[in-house]
Every structure is written in C-alpha cells, then in structure tokens.
Image: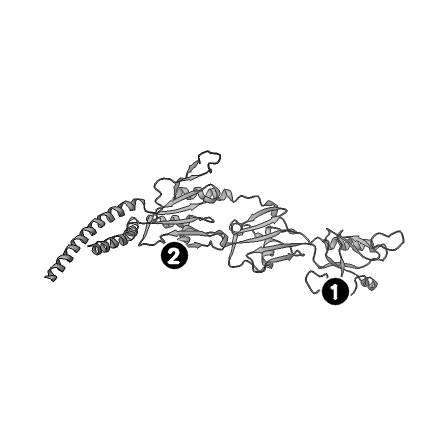
Amino acid sequence: MRLGKQQAFWASAVRTAAGGVRALGSIAVCGALSACMVSPGMRMVQPPTLPVSSGEDGKPAVEQQIPITDINLTSLRQMREAAAQAKKTDSSALFGEPGPYRIGPGDVLQITVWDHPELAAAVGPPGNPQRPSDAAGGFVVDHDGNVQLPYAGKVDISGDAAGLVHVGGETADQAQRKIYRLLSEVFVKPQVTVRVTSFRAGQIYVDGEVRAPGAQTINDIPMTLSEALNRAGGFSPNADQSRIVIVRDGTSYPVNVTQMIESGQSPSRVMLKNGDMLRVMSREDNGVYVMGEVGKPATVMPMTDGKLTLAEALSQAGSVNPGSADAKELYVIRDAARGKPEIYHLNATSPVSMLLANQFNLQSKDVVYIDSSGLVRFSRVLNLLLPLVNAGLTTAIVTK
C-alpha cells in the first residue's frame, strides 16, 4: 500500500514538473527569440548617432549621424587621395646641401706654424681629456669666436701683441688664410696649418626608439638624418620608421622615412642643425585594436614601416572565427576621440573581400570589430536562460 502511494506521489510530481518545464521552456524560447532581437552586438543596420555637444546651459545635446561607408574600390581610391593630400606637410626647412664645418665657440684648434717652435708653447702641455666633453690640448675658441695666438691680431696700447683672432663662423681653410695673413706682418712667409681637434660648438639630441639615444656632436661630417640615425645605432626593433619628429626652434616637423625612400628621396637631404632634437616614435603608440569574433582579440602593432592593412591585422589576431563570426558584419571604427568618427563596413563573405582588406590601410587607434552570427547569439542567450529552467524544475519537484 505504501509503495502504491509513493508511486502515485512521484508520478504526480513528474507530471507537475513536466508541465512546469513545458511552461518554462515556452517562456525560454519566447524570451530567447525576443532576446535575439536586442542581444548585444554591432548590428549597424541604421547609422548610429553621436553627441557632438554636451548640452550645457540648459540646451539639448546635439547629435550627429555617423554614416557607414562600405569598403570598395571607390572608397579605397578616395582614401588614398585623401592620405596623399594629408601627407603634404611643409618640411622644406629641413632640406639643405651639406657644407664645410664652421668653427664655433668651444671648439679646440690645432694651429701649427712651422719652423717656429716657440709658438707651440702657447698651446700648453697636451691635454688628457677624461670625458668627451673635456677640451683637448690646443687653442680654445671663446664665446665670442676668438682665439688667442701670439704675434697675430691687434696690438694693445702697451705694445704687446694681444693675439686675438676672430675665427667664429669660418671654415678651417678660411681661418688658416686669415692667420697666415696676420703672421705675415711679423714673419716672412710663415707656413701655417689649422685644423679642428675637438668639436664642441654644436650638438643634436636623438631620443626614442634608437639603440643608443643621447647627444651627438656635430663635426666635419655633415649631420644629416641618416648620419644621426647611424651614430645612434640605428632603429630599434620597436621603431616606427614612418613617424620621426624633428623639433627645431619650437616647431615640430614630421618625417616619414619610408615615404621618402618610396618616393625616391634620400634621408640624407634632411640637414640637422645645432640644437635640433630628433625623436623616433614607437610602434606601440600606434596600435590597432581587433575585437569580436576573432581567434585572439589583441592590440596589433603596425609594421616597422608604419603600415598595417586590415588583412594583416586580422591575420595577427588569429583571423575570423569561422564557428561564431558573421563575416558580413566586419567594421572599422576610426577617429572617435577627435570628434570626427568614421565607420567602415566590409562584407568578408565576398570573394574579393580579402583583396579589399589587403588594400585598406588602418590608422593609429583604429578599432576592428567582427560581430557574431545570429545563431551564436541565440545560443548565448539560451545558455543564460537554461539555469533558470533548471532552477524552476528543481523548485517544482521539491515543492511537490
């Protein structure tokens, strides 16, 4: 008798639970279907809007509609033309022709007058500099550009030779001819040689992604952009060769070494001057964010030449996930932080999509997003509802 009652109890519980499951299942299906309509994802059917004003002073915020541009041959051609126009920066002040070294304050000269060893005593004992900035033995050019050489220069009121010779701004050959002319008033056809033994009048500063950053002294070898990078040990592996900045007299000049070489221009045409600062930017400062249904979402760095196409970014992020991605919904979001956002769309199911992606150049801080398919979103919503169904079934059995 007891066994019959237990069987009846469990049969009733099962019928009640089955009814609850059917009810919850119906609710779950309806909820899942409706949830698929509002589930998260960048299904940009309508152009999104973005507030362009904060609505201060009681005024309503103004919203700007952001159009979605399809990536095709026409849009790629327009982007290339716009990029070429944007690259026309005024860097003419950086170009110049190499010339001879000009003597400046702080330089040390070796002035030799042959057959007159008494003049060598004016140089003093040979120096033994412990640091590169220490002066070597010789005639040091003062801050006015003068050197003091006996028997040369003006004579003071006491009759002693002051020996001040102005050589600042002159080449070694010009200084040699000037000293010869002055000494010819005292000696008969003196044999004079002048050369710079220590260059200390000018220097530039190299910073950023180079192997040996620091100050570089300007000497008789023309200080071109190529020479400065070579003295600094060349680019580091993390250098972005398309983003070099030269700061001169309070003005920053961008230099794209990759673009110069591609256009047939040599970086040696860029002449650096005393006080210039050369900075090589890092690739990490110009990463691209790849999100959504890819193999491994990540921040992708541009190549060493500063370029990164959409195809390369997808490849580095593990490509499109074939099991969960909706290849029709691939978006590139650009320039949202500067008030002029742009959104580009690519249908990656097209046979020519990878050709287009390989020609679409990404820019710094771009966001690449691939949306999930409808079935995957339905499955994710259903996974959220299944715990509720299981909880309802357990509650029905326990209550009965």
Front residue of 187 and 370: 370
User: Residue at position x 40%, y 41% from top?
Assistant: 74
Disc 1 residue crowd, few under 14, some 14–19, many 20+, Cα 10 Å = few
Q: Which residue is under mark 2?
A: 296
For residue 115, say whether it is visible.
no
Give coordinates of residue 269: x percent, y percent.
59, 50
User: Residue at position x 16%, y 53% from top?
Assistant: 15
Report the number of numbered marks: 2
Residue 223 vs 82, above or below: the answer is below
Q: Which residue is under mark 1?
A: 127
- Quarter occupied by the C terminus: bottom left
Give coordinates of residue 29: x percent, y percent.
24, 48
Residue 211 position by quadrant: bottom right
- Quarter occupied by the N terminus: bottom left
Front residue of 335 and 189: 335
Left/right of residue 92 with respect to residue 155 in the rendered view: left
Residue 105 position by quadrant: bottom right
* Amino acid on which disc 2 is placed: Lys
* Amino acid on which disc 1 is placed: Gly
Q: Do the residues labelled 2 and 1 touch (CB within 8 Å)?
A: no
Left/right of residue 165 with respect to residue 348 in the rendered view: right
